[in-house]
Image (cartoon, helix red, strand yellow):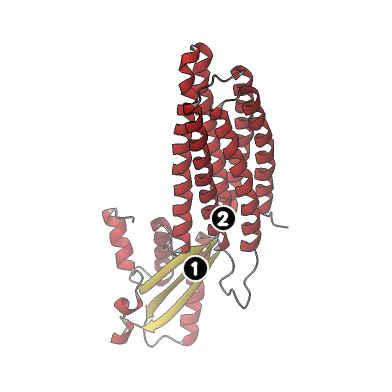
């Protein structure tokens, strides 16, 4: 039986529960607003992981009559929601930081608290690395977003520990370091949140596949049809882990139906062997007919455009 990508989300949920307990403990023993911000982000991690589990379960459902292209786009809702949750956490951190500026207090038992925070970072780091491998295997934006969120949590926690560690060797008048570090963490969290929302938006807007994958498609067409192959209207998109490719292929008008079908099948197999979870649709047209050259009407890319972008380094 094939491995389910959902098991990686369970790893994330377990890690979030463990680190939430550890970081809340660290905040409790120190009364540090910086460690409070770290604990709040972990609460977001748990909420995001639970939402990711729900959307990934939906995305894995097979296509049906109402969703002929499958449910893969559900994954983009997960990364978008995770970005929004991160932004909400940042607002809470800023509020707590302002409160601490107005009512300064020196954190207590910092040594113990920072040790606990580092332990939670180890848990998140190991979990994130495992999830990134799972994201690569299953080509899942949900797993990738959740793993990168955990890694962001790791680096912000390490920065927090390094910053608050200074307070172990400074006088009480330096207590302002605590809310300052919390504000810096909020800024970093905001950046992460907007990045996830942007990626979600790009997927929902049916952005074309990356240039490297377009070159792979072009190479597959030419390896089967010859270097002088003519095609246009290449349109691509991705929904979760599923890739969709369609284009018009121009062949000699005297080609038989069987010959055209066999060539299209060969091209489809070649593309699918290089790109995972790829659905290919090819429309055949006679290259001698002027009406076949309807690039402007169809839209999409043609082979010459792809090769020009590769030649001149335009990979947008």
Residue 181 in picture, x, y percent from top left: 47, 28
For the residue pair 232 and 225, the one nearer the viewer reads as 232
* Circle 2 SS class: helix
* 59 versus 231 height, above or below: above
Rendered residue at 49%/81% (across/down)? 261
Quadrant of the rendered image containing residue 132:
top right
Tell which residue pokes out farthest to the left in this image.
Answer: 312
Q: Earlier in the sequence, mark 2 or mark 1?
A: 2
Task: Using residue 16 as the reference point, say whether residue 293 is left or right of it.
Answer: left
Q: Position of residue 180 (x, y in %)?
A: 45, 27
Q: Return the residue nearer the eye: 225 or 215.
A: 215
Instruction: Say which residue appears at 50% left-offset and 31% top-offset.
Output: 99
Q: Residue drawn 31% across and 86% down?
A: 291
Q: Residue at x 59, y 66 (%)?
A: 71
> How far from the left and from the top, in percent, is residue 256?
45, 87
| Observer able to see residue 289 | no
Q: Quadrant of the N terminus?
A: bottom right
SS class, disc 1: strand
**Which residue matches tag 2?**
78
**What residue did someone put label 1 on?**
244
Residue 250 at what x, y percent from top left?
A: 37, 79
Q: Nearer the viewer, mark 2 or mark 1?
A: 2
Mark 1 crowdedness (10 Å alpha carbons): few <14, some 14-19, many ≥20: some
Whole-Å distance between the Cαs marked 2 and 1?
21 Å
């Amino acid at each position: 039986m094939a491995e389910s990508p959902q098991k990686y989300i369970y790893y994330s949920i377990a890690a979030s529960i463990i680190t939430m307990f550890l970081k809340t403990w660290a905040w409790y023993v120190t009364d540090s607003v910086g460690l409070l911000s770290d604990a709040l982000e972990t609460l977001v991690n748990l909420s995001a992981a639970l939402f990711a589990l729900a959307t990934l379960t939906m995305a894995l459902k097979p296509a049906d009559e109402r969703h002929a292209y499958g449910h893969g786009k559900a994954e983009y809702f997960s990364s978008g929601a995770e970005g929004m949750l991160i932004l909400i956490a940042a607002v809470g951190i800023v509020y707590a930081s302002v409160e601490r500026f107005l009512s300064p207090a020196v954190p207590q038992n910092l040594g113990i608290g920072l040790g606990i925070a580092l332990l939670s970072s180890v848990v998140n780091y190991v979990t994130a690395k495992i999830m990134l491998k799972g994201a690569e295997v299953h080509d899942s934006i949900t797993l990738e977003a959740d793993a990168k969120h955990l890694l962001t949590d790791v680096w912000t926690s390490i920065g927090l520990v390094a910053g608050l560690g200074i307070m172990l060797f400074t006088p009480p008048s330096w207590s302002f370091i605590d809310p300052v570090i919390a504000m810096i963490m909020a800024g970093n969290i905001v950046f992460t949140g907007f990045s996830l929302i942007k990626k979600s938006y790009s997927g929902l807007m049916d952005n074309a596949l990356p240039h490297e994958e377009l070159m792979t498609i072009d190479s597959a067409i030419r390896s089967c049809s010859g270097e002088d192959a003519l095609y246009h209207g290449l349109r691509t998109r991705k929904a979760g882990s599923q890739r969709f490719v369609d284009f018009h292929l121009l062949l000699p008008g005297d080609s038989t139906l069987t010959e055209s079908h066999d060539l299209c099948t060969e091209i489809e197999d070649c593309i699918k062997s290089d790109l995972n979870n790829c659905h290919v649709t090819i429309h055949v047209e006679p290259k001698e007919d002027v009406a076949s050259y309807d690039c402007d009407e169809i839209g999409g890319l043609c082979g010459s455009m792809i090769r020009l972008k590769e030649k001149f380094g335009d990979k947008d």
